Image (spheres, helix red, strand yellow):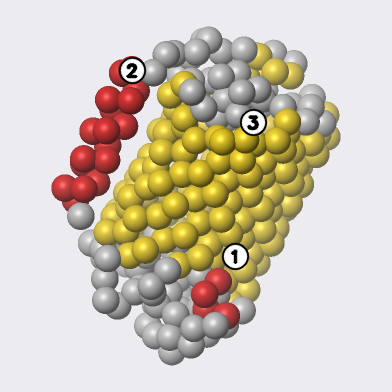
Amino acid sequence: MKKSFFIFLSMIACLTVRAQMPSVKPTVNGSPGNIQPFLFSVNTLTSTSPSWNLYYSGSYGERTAAPFGIDGVDQQVAFKGYLGNRFTLYANASIGIARSGGVASAQQAELLRDFVGGKTTFGPRLGLGLGVSHDLSNVGAVFSRITASFDRASWRIGGNLRFEKAFSSNRDDIDLITSIGFHHRIAGNFFAGVEAVGEDLEGFWEADEAEGGAKLLVGPSVNITPSNSRFSFSLCGGPVFYATHSTAYPSEAIRDIGTIGTQNGFTLRGAVSFNLHQ
């Protein structure tokens, strides 16, 4: 699976070289288009967005972060760029630090393309992505992601539907993950709203779901992009509800709100993105 992962990255690099580098166009109050406004949904970029961006996020959770130890902390570094022709590249690596002192990592990369919209910042967009991942337990997976969003000057909504297939006999045939977020402008480039996440939803009909059962999170979300700044900041958190409990011991698959599946908890995630262009 590692070989496939590197082949996938090589193909992306070739596309990057061939793609045109679009100029950055400001949107509101001198700030560029939003790179990643929601914490739990991946959005596609447009030609009016900053072309290449670095993205860092950190999470803290109680009774939710099994791969990194109970009540663990995880860090994620991502690279996101617009390749032209409505293609978006998104790749990240996660590092988990347990209270016991252990450290683990996971990686994933994907290529997304808008098939509806995607040529301007505002308006509806509908896209499809394909990617590969390598989780904490050395298990590889392939996944597809459906992205949908609608942006206006005063509000935005976006969400994902992700289907994942892990290459292990101890995992589910297909994992289903969904998320949605809504933001409304409060003042200037400050937005606030709510995000919701549903992970491993196949747990509603599979008693032996491999990640411990279906999990849900709903909580407040904020995003701010200072005027004439290359930085953007986001924060979201809330309670994690374990809607079902599986008979299987939770795996170490890549999940944003944990894989314990035994009791409720909470997760708080913050992120900062940096536009690499002036």
Q: Which mark is residue 181?
A: none
The residue closer to the viewer here, 236 or 216, is 216
The residue closer to the viewer here, 150 or 275, is 150
Q: Mark 1 points at which residue?
A: 198
What secondary structure is marked by label 1? strand
For the residue marked with disc 2, what is the amino acid?
Arg
Q: Which mark is residue 18?
A: 2
Residue 108 located left or right of residue 1: right
| Label 2 crowd bin: few (<14), some (14–19), many (20+), radius 10 Å | few
Q: Which mark is residue 117?
A: 3
User: Residue 105, how many percent across, how many down?
Assistant: 30, 53
* Foreground tag (3 vs 1): 3
For the residue marked with disc 1, what is the amino acid?
Gly
Nearest to N terminus: mark 3 or mark 1:
3
What residue sits 56% from the left and 36% below the top? 115
User: Residue 270, how many percent across, how many down?
Assistant: 56, 45
Nearest to N terminus: mark 2 or mark 3:
2
Cα–Cα gap, marks 3 and 1: 26 Å
What secondary structure is marked by label 2? helix
Cα–Cα gap, marks 2 and 3: 22 Å
Residue 254 located left or right of residue 62: left
Which image quadrant is residue 235 in?
Answer: top right
